[in-house]
Amino acid sequence: MWSALLLSLAVGELQVTTTGFLDTRVQLAVTRADGTPGLVPLAEGNLQVKVRPTEAFTVFTDTSLVWQSAFLVQGGEKDLPQYRPQAVLSELYAEGQPHEHIRLLAGKKRIVWGTGFAFNPTDLLNPPKDPTDPTFQRAGAWLAQVEVPFEKVTVSVVFAGKVTRQFAGLPTAFVVSPHNPSAESIKGWVPDDRDGEAHWAATARVYALLWNTDVTLSYAFTNLYNDAFRNKSRAGLSLSRTFGGLELHAEGLLQGGSSRLEVVDGCDELPLRCVARGQPPVERPHLDASFVNLKGLVGGRYQFNDDSLLSVEYFFNGDGHDVDGFRRLVQLGVRNPQLAEALRGASADPGTPQKFSFDPLRRHYLVASFQKPRIFDDWTLLLTLLAGLEDLSFQAMAQVTWMPKEWLSLAFAAYLPFDGVPDWGVDVGDGERRGEFGLAGFGSRFLLQAKVFF
Amino acid sequence: MLLTTLTLLTLAAPPDGKELLAKYDAFMSPPNFKATALMTAHRDDGTTRSYKMTIVKAGADRNRIWFHEPAAVRGQEILRNGDNSWVYMPNLKRAMRLASRDSFQGGDFNNADVLRTNYVHDYEVTVGEDPAKLDTWVLELKAKTAEAAYERIKLWVGRSPAGMPVRGEYYTASGKMLRSAAFSDVKDFGNGWTRPAKVSMRNELATQRHSDMVFESADPTVVTPDNRFTMSDLGR
């Protein structure tokens, strides 16, 4: 690698491309739960550098430094770890093409084979993304890839090792837990995160351009990688094609069983009594089940003559709860917020701080977005609706973006949750009933953003 | 003398439409090339947005574009392979399918105007004359594939050199004009390729706006390797 770099420097063939942005945003929110901030200022400096010593070799990094803080926090805990400054190493990889039909890649990269926009059921590797703005999650996974590309067929094999410990956004352990417990766990501030197991994933896909359709068949074998499955095989299929001005796509993942976390019947009201009699209040009863489980998405996009863009997707989450399971989970959380927080867990590498985070707990969702450019001058209007179809709760997002200069973008966004039909929601105390999108710690939120590109 | 020339032009028998259209295609887009181009979108309020890009083409139906400026779109790429087109979005870290008729970077060209320039393949053609422009032939094009950019196109091409683009009008099936183009600044780019360096496309639905595409440099001898026209190569 270094000899190729030095040689290219000597003969002047080195190509270096740099880009990036400085993004500042301020979020004001109505809080509805403890541990939720009313004011979050954030500044992100991003730099992307691509170095090509030769046509066949590339080194790339996409790195951000994020300063953020949380103010007006509801409840007693004022220091929220997820709002601390951090580095975000979204991508850092080297890629070589020793032969026309062989590509090798190693490092951290976001590889997405699925065609879904708001959700990617077949993506088992990357940090989750914001379904109301999927372009916001830039972070990938640490992996090695071998790819065999042809004009209309590509075969890829990937091995990924999970980050098992990370500080301020920088990884310190992969695949297996570090030998020593962290200082925080020794002092009892956080649970010991070591489990002595290997956390890894191997995935492969065959992409083919058939009948003017993108067809991707994928297979994944994972062990404790982003979920609780051990030695789990899964198969995926994704499709995309245009019909005139209409783009249609579908993406699905099939697996045996489910890693769904369920509250044991009766433990939602008195979880400590369950613990006292040796019964964990929650369990994953379907981890080794043999029933076939599906996560799938179908959707389409259409651009109108005035350049407006309409996108609609339906997402079926086979891991989602039925109404009783969801009610027990919510009631456990309402009565024992600290236990619920501990059970939810946190990914070692959550990636870029998101404007809106969502972990689907139910089964049926609809995502619709409408973007109309040039509503006035260079003002763009974006309306997004993320709705749960079982309780008709939703998160609506309205955003106006103005680009007064080619290098400057100013945006104002409002995130408005709707609690859904009360009769179809769950009791959250005092007789109040809410649907899934009414359960977030935030009520309405307002975001001001200024972004400078360079 | 002028009268004689005009009379001769008027009396000239129309050439074969398909041959003339093939010449138009050859002027606009030879089988292989690499070019740098600047698209400037002129907005309703008089401001402009400029996009600098590299365009390569191989064979009749493979193109790829890399956007270099402005910084907000740097890293975006477009690939066309046959009837299929994709855009690679650096923020999304993946490619998405594009429709031929979608707007090209929000300007007044659509994707097919830039990527799909093999009109002989996409359109049936008949030849006529325009009494107001006797130094041109008028080609009436009718789409023969759903992937074509427009249902109907009316092209004015020069009689000498035959097929040199002069003006275009682009219509819906119902006859509504969507866009019109003026081809100008004919330039010899070397290695036997001469074409209008500037295409000015006016949006007839919002006539305050137009976009100019200017080829700054072009080389028809550059043959781009096949592996640059695969979806898996996008973003690399």
Image: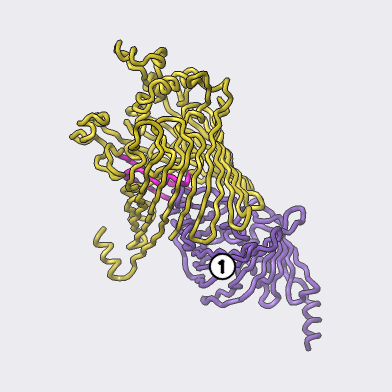
Q: Residue furthest top?
A: A277
Residue bearing the label numbered 1: B30
Which color was chain B given? purple
Q: What subunit carries mark 1?
A: B
Type of amino acid at the residue the image marks with label 1: Pro
Q: How far from the left and from the top, in percent, is residue A256? A: 42, 25
Q: Residue furthest left?
A: A180
Q: Is residue B9 magenta?
A: no
Q: Residue at x 42, y 56 (%)?
A: A21
Q: How far from the left and from the top, in percent, is residue A201? A: 33, 36
Q: Dividing the image into 4 quarters, which one contains the N terminus of chain A?
A: bottom left
Q: How far from the left and from the top, in percent, is residue A387? A: 55, 32
Q: Is residue B172 above or below residue A132?
A: below
Taking the image as drawn, is residue B84 in sight? yes
- Image quarter for residue B43? bottom right
Q: Residue at x 36, y 63 (%)?
A: A16
Which color was chain A given? yellow
Question: Toward the viewer: B234 or B68?
Answer: B68
Q: Is residue A148 magenta?
A: yes
Question: Is B29 on the left-hand or right-hand side of B10?
Answer: left
Taking the image as drawn, is residue A116 in sight? no
Q: Residue at x 44, y 56 (%)?
A: B227
The stretch of residues the image draws in magenta is: A134-161
Question: Toward the viewer: A50 or A4?
Answer: A50
